[in-house]
Amino acid sequence: MEKLNIGVIGCGFMGRTHSNAYRQAPKFFDTTYQPILKAVCARNEERVKAFADNWGYESYETDWRKLIERDDIDAIDIVAPNHVHKEMAIAAAEAGKMVLCEKPLGLNPAESQEMVDAVEKAGVPNMVWYNYRFVPAIALAKNLVDSGKLGRIFHYRVNFLQDWTIDPNVPQGGEGLWRLDVNSAGSGVTGDLLAHSIDTAMWINGPIESITAMTETFIKERLHQETGKVEKVGIDDACAFLARFKNGSMAVFESTRYARGHTAFYRFEINGENASVSWELPDLHRLSYFDQNDDSAVRGWRNIHVSNNDGGHPYMENWWVPGIVIGFEHSFIHGVYQFLKSLEGGDHERQFPTFSDAMETDKICAAILESSKSQTWQNING
Amino acid sequence: MEKLNIGVIGCGFMGRTHSNAYRQAPKFFDTTYQPILKAVCARNEERVKAFADNWGYESYETDWRKLIERDDIDAIDIVAPNHVHKEMAIAAAEAGKMVLCEKPLGLNPAESQEMVDAVEKAGVPNMVWYNYRFVPAIALAKNLVDSGKLGRIFHYRVNFLQDWTIDPNVPQGGEGLWRLDVNSAGSGVTGDLLAHSIDTAMWINGPIESITAMTETFIKERLHQETGKVEKVGIDDACAFLARFKNGSMAVFESTRYARGHTAFYRFEINGENASVSWELPDLHRLSYFDQNDDSAVRGWRNIHVSNNDGGHPYMENWWVPGIVIGFEHSFIHGVYQFLKSLEGGDHERQFPTFSDAMETDKICAAILESSKSQTWQNING
Amino acid sequence: MEKLNIGVIGCGFMGRTHSNAYRQAPKFFDTTYQPILKAVCARNEERVKAFADNWGYESYETDWRKLIERDDIDAIDIVAPNHVHKEMAIAAAEAGKMVLCEKPLGLNPAESQEMVDAVEKAGVPNMVWYNYRFVPAIALAKNLVDSGKLGRIFHYRVNFLQDWTIDPNVPQGGEGLWRLDVNSAGSGVTGDLLAHSIDTAMWINGPIESITAMTETFIKERLHQETGKVEKVGIDDACAFLARFKNGSMAVFESTRYARGHTAFYRFEINGENASVSWELPDLHRLSYFDQNDDSAVRGWRNIHVSNNDGGHPYMENWWVPGIVIGFEHSFIHGVYQFLKSLEGGDHERQFPTFSDAMETDKICAAILESSKSQTWQNING
Amino acid sequence: MEKLNIGVIGCGFMGRTHSNAYRQAPKFFDTTYQPILKAVCARNEERVKAFADNWGYESYETDWRKLIERDDIDAIDIVAPNHVHKEMAIAAAEAGKMVLCEKPLGLNPAESQEMVDAVEKAGVPNMVWYNYRFVPAIALAKNLVDSGKLGRIFHYRVNFLQDWTIDPNVPQGGEGLWRLDVNSAGSGVTGDLLAHSIDTAMWINGPIESITAMTETFIKERLHQETGKVEKVGIDDACAFLARFKNGSMAVFESTRYARGHTAFYRFEINGENASVSWELPDLHRLSYFDQNDDSAVRGWRNIHVSNNDGGHPYMENWWVPGIVIGFEHSFIHGVYQFLKSLEGGDHERQFPTFSDAMETDKICAAILESSKSQTWQNING
């Protein structure tokens, strides 16, 4: 077993999920490398110290540049707002560290390209945290499509719905709210929720060729928590787009933070010639599957409880017993496992997106914002 | 096409469902006999006249004995409270009429036996209206069990839950409320709801050999609508029993009118060695089916939308197009179809219970009430 | 009670649903006018005769012009392929008949305008059969939105998915298949399924202002049943569009006949500031409702079984008892009721679309097809 | 923060869940005491060593008596087969250790009584691991009942269904299979699954007064893994019982390992005068709730996604963000939290059963087995 010293930048919600994942992964999955919680970094010393104590980090920093400079760190995990991803990732790569970065990669494709260039030049392992790939039911969906069971794909449809910003009194910017500030986030639901949807979609269904989009900002002004002033809201509150995939299938994507009743509702469905699959986040351990080849008298949508999966599932056999569900946090544990496994070399197929892969998602996000502005179809990659 | 002149006794909720069924059946099903709404009978002339007008009966009567005496009536359909079933059925049989009777048959097995004797002596076609047999999803469940897909049956479980008598101000007896009066109904949920459950169960899973039961009357006294006095409630408000079937399977049956949130919730599930099925009344067009022989990677409960059934279903091809659901009223239409079909002779397998079949259910209901009183197990038929 | 003599043109699936509706409506709903099945018309004499016999029509015709000329017909109901709607409707109006027409109105807005002009010039009552308005759960959804419970509407999303044309061996044109022939149908899913979706949406959520669309024809050539040749398919197999409503809400509409597993899946969801509702055709008696004002400890999507609705529902009290579901065919019965009720005058609010209303849907369908071709946003009505 | 040194006996499935719980609890919940994984004990040295390494135990033992003798252990957690609970618990209590014990307590009430006597004599904190109490949705159900929202309780119904022993080739006894050996387990589903159901039921709905039961052993003989011989099976494969609670409500309990399609299906429903709740293990984060006081137009079962619960839920605020589900393993983490919290004194209400509480469940299990044998009703405590 080899130790892999991790330095995490950020200690919010995602900082917690990553910290937990590093702790838990080695208890459930066999890997050559074992992550060590070497240091965590955040600007507020009191807070980062408490965080380090709680999660068992050996040390903490308040200046991320110092963290990156440390010789005892092998991998930097960036769990900070989007607008600082680029600077941190490039510095980490230049320091020869492996780099893991929360999604999306940069604020825009230009930033993302710089980040890709940096990790490629440095030749360091890198990953972007599109964690939905590591949800057991989604991994099963991917396997089913890859196996050919669905046949030719006709349709891909997605909703990613939330409702946490309907109240106009929710401020923008500041602690826990940087996702509402266009300067920190780059965009609203497009970079936050659609980026996840697009990553999953391309992972399963291949490249997107063209799109046309519509965005909306329902609440035009909000108090900015840092300036103390009511300011124009720069992000998209909601976004929907139509798409064509390279494989000839059609898609509809929709995302919003104004869907009352949906705290975190990510749903996708794929319709193929012979079979269909669908999945919904609120019951993340279930996959719905319809197979036209079933005997017609008893044909119907199957409700697969993925905990039961004994057919060579990539994750479930490492957990408890059949029938017993795991939670959302486990997707991050699987992500850590996949990253560690990739370091071993061998023929384990990579399941996560590198910076280079993730930049494709950023390009589509940029095309969405451009399409919405210009009201035109956009071709991706030309 | 031959005409079959029907005389219906009763014009309440069930009178409406039967009238509708006689009208609709010939429009959707091919049968040699065509039911004619010859006459309807009820005591209140104003009401029965309006009912006859609405449903297109050729005539009406206010005295059921007169109806039975009429030469132009071929079949008597008894849709009246339980305590008058016996007298009407015997008179009808003695007059040489076919007899259809709402369930349960008599107030107790002794009454039922007299009724069976009467129709058998008269040699007249007869049927008891256990209409759940004619629900498309239940017919499919029966076919699956008969086909052997489930293998050895281990478990049968049933709930039949309602909530309409929780309010202590609901009176007993009188118009629309005879089901709460033990003199009219014979029992409470046992003869009303469990009788349905038992008929379905024995139709699908064979004879019941022994039972032990528990009943309860939650509201001890209610205003009697006819006497104008607060009187002791004589019916069982709730009843549950354990049972053993002849095929070795175990069963649990439960019924109540005190299950808040369940207006009319009839659910059953059958677990076999290789497969299971379950069904619930609120979505009566769906059958859940689990098949252990499915590939383990995609095994799960199948949600069969019975409207889609194109595998030789006994009813669905006569209705609309796949995907389009029918309602509860259609079970009665199917009942009429099955009765008419049985008159044709030929090899069409009888799908409805005769008086003789239905008496088996009455015996079990009587054993339930006895078991509850004596707190002992009861063997059926011995 | 006054008689209203109906002449129906067409005896396919929809001919059956309408015939059934005229028979059943007066048994369950009180109206001044009573529909009489006076005559049915179709070209094939053997078939139309059998149809008339089955449904109890007093007579039949094989030439629709003759039907329209008959003095004993008050209302013409057009249940024929789309390309003959215009000619029939105009002739009927000119003959002073009331006109009911299956949806969509004309093959294109120009045809529709001629039809509107004809009925308005003749001053005859008219209706287009957008029957989903008469589904009890959808009527409830409309009431909830109108009541203000949802508050400001942010989102409207729709899918209308089928799977019956995935097989490339399904021919186009001819008996039962005219919906695949662009000359008879005008378009594919746009006029067939999206037209329904658009009518429901505008009924509930008001006018649509602009759209951008994408269509696809997955199977490019099919055997034409009438010519006997393999011909280019002219219809859209699938269509999705983005829309903005006048009330500021955003919408996504999608429809296809290539969604494996969905025989007839029409779903819509509306997200408002305070509450949301959603509905799905396979369980048409259920409405999902989420109310943010519920106590947070027990807040969740409510599964409303519309059969239970005792709060002044426009249809359910006329049927059976709470807990008992009706089917899809009943939407047409409600449509007949609404049409008859509107003839009475009085203050009963019209619930169905007139020709003039339905033309708005045709305009949007035309804009969709144009947008798909030109890849541009289209403004409706300017 | 004070350290609490834990010694765990057992390293099977439950050994893993407990070990994980001790590690995770302090990361998410604030408690004065912090559990230290001091030692784990199992007979197979190779296996216990690997287990200790994986989970970070400071040491291991192969003789449980040695573990109990160690001065550096504060609490003994017994995660071993049922037949050794008594001896271990008494020894631990006599050594002055706190004792946590997997359920059920003893093999029978006599054993359980000895265990209760031992911990009470020693005056040591003690707990039995009925972990379903710590499932967030069940904790919410308990709160709702306690709050009076349901009003008078009429019905409690439970199923606990599994399907893992249908195959007659599953051996009894030995590694991982002691639950099939009556000598190790004491009983079959009664002590395994019904014990959980009974604990939950009495926690929420109060004492059970009387029961009548039926058990079955479907597969009469199985290979015994330790003796190598085919031997008679001594356990109950399935068990159902009727019950009356002290509060006047009626109950039906059923459990089996022969319900095809149910890997681990625990469902309960409680019907009260004003409201009802129900829950199912496969979607353990959902609680269904029906409230008669809702406006009738929008009344329906509410699907509460407990992750969203922001109304003072005892667990959910310590985890992630609304909308994000946790898993089954978390119930054990909550159990650790509750045990630690109880050591602090103060007014935190105890949420777990002590040995004394758990003995009540054992008495009911004994009454069930007796009732099944004698075919009689059994009164509990008298």
Image (spheres, coloured by chain):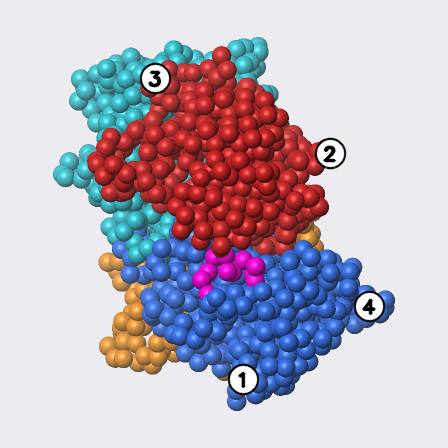
Chain colours: A cyan, B blue, C red, D orange
Residue C287: image quadrant is top right
Q: Disc 4: which chain?
A: B
For the question of whether residue A345 can be seen, the reply is yes
Q: Disc 2: which chain?
A: C
Say which amino acid is labelled 3.
Gln
Lateral position of residue C190 relative to residue B4, left or right: left
Instruction: Indicate which disc, 1 or 4, sits on the residue closer to the N terminus.
Output: 1
Residue D341 belongs to the span the image colors magenta: no
Say which amino acid is labelled 1.
Gly
- The label nearer to you, 2 versus 4, is 2
* Disc 1 to disc 4, C-alpha distance: 38 Å
Have a look at marks 3 and 1 and say if they share a chain.
Answer: no
**Residue C298 vertical placement versus B112 (above, below):** above
* Disc 2 to disc 3, C-alpha distance: 47 Å
Say which amino acid is labelled 4.
Glu
Q: Position of residue B287 (x, y in %)?
A: 43, 57
Q: Residue at x 38, y 40 (%)?
A: C162
- The label nearer to you, 1 versus 4, is 1
Q: Disc 3: which chain?
A: C
Say which amino acid is labelled 2.
Gly
Q: Residue at x 39, y 63 (%)?
A: B276
Instruction: Indicate which disc, 2 or 3, sits on the residue closer to the N terminus.
Output: 2
Q: Which mark is residue C375?
A: 3
